Image: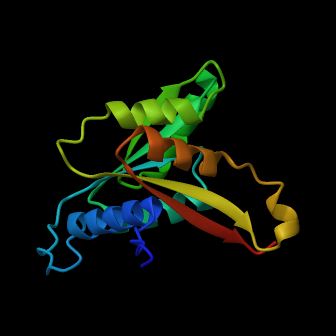
Amino acid sequence: MPRRRLRRRPVLAGALERYYTLVKDRLSLDATPPRPTRTRGLVIVPLGGVDAVAVSALDAAYALGDEVVVVAVFDAQAKAESMRADWARWDPGARLDIIDSPQHALVHPVIDYVEQIPHDDRPVTVLIPQVEPRHSRYRVLENQRGFLMAGLLSSHTDAIVCLLKLELDL
């Protein structure tokens, strides 16, 4: 009589099943979740000037949180003073914090700022405006710092990161 061979589940299939079971348990997929809690959030918006981008970004920021802080990074004191004067004239109701960056860096000073700003255990959202021409042939002409900043903020901080697409009719 031939010996009956037991079929064993492949090791990979068993590991995958265990993983998905753990995910289901951790996400409580079979249970009714508790109601969401409403908190008052802090929204940080990196900007380089007072312009149409700033208007759109602040409109969106105020929709996301009750406190909005604009952070601007400059490598020259004259540029920083010009931004302060423009900001005071406009007076949009958000605090302006200027970071001095003599190394001409933009992304890492913003990340450091987000890591260090006191937020009193409130959620922090970073809203990054990103100008995008409608036609793809012009998109390569826009810098990609917003995408780089979003990726690094996501991996180095616990902030919620939002990209605000500002489409230009070009």
* Residue 48 rendering spot, x and y as whole percentages: 59, 43
Q: Residue farthest to the top? A: 102
- Residue 67 position in % (x across, y down): 28, 53
Q: List x then y, in percent, for residue 108.
A: 54, 31
Choose between 81 and 3: the one closer to the eye. Answer: 3
The residue closer to the viewer here, 147 or 104, is: 147
Q: Residue at x 27, y 70 (%)?
A: 24
Could you tell whether 163 is left or right of 114 in the image?
right
Image height of 132 relative to 118, above or below: below
**What colour-coding does the image apply?**
rainbow
Q: Quadrant of the N terminus?
A: bottom left
Q: Which quarter of the figure has residue 8?
A: bottom left
Q: Measured along the vertical axis of the image, is residue 110 above or below residue 39?
A: above
Q: Tell me where residue 168 sits by quadrant.
A: bottom right
| Residue 13 higher or lower than 120, as above or below | below
Please tell me which residue is depicted at 15% across the width and 76% down the height of the picture.
Answer: 33
Asked whether residue 126 is in view, the answer is yes
Q: Residue at 43% of width from left, 59% of height from top?
A: 11
Image quadrant in which the C terminus is located = bottom right
Q: Nearer the viewer, residue 120 or 59?
A: 120
Question: Residue sitting at 62 percent across and 45 percent down?
Answer: 148
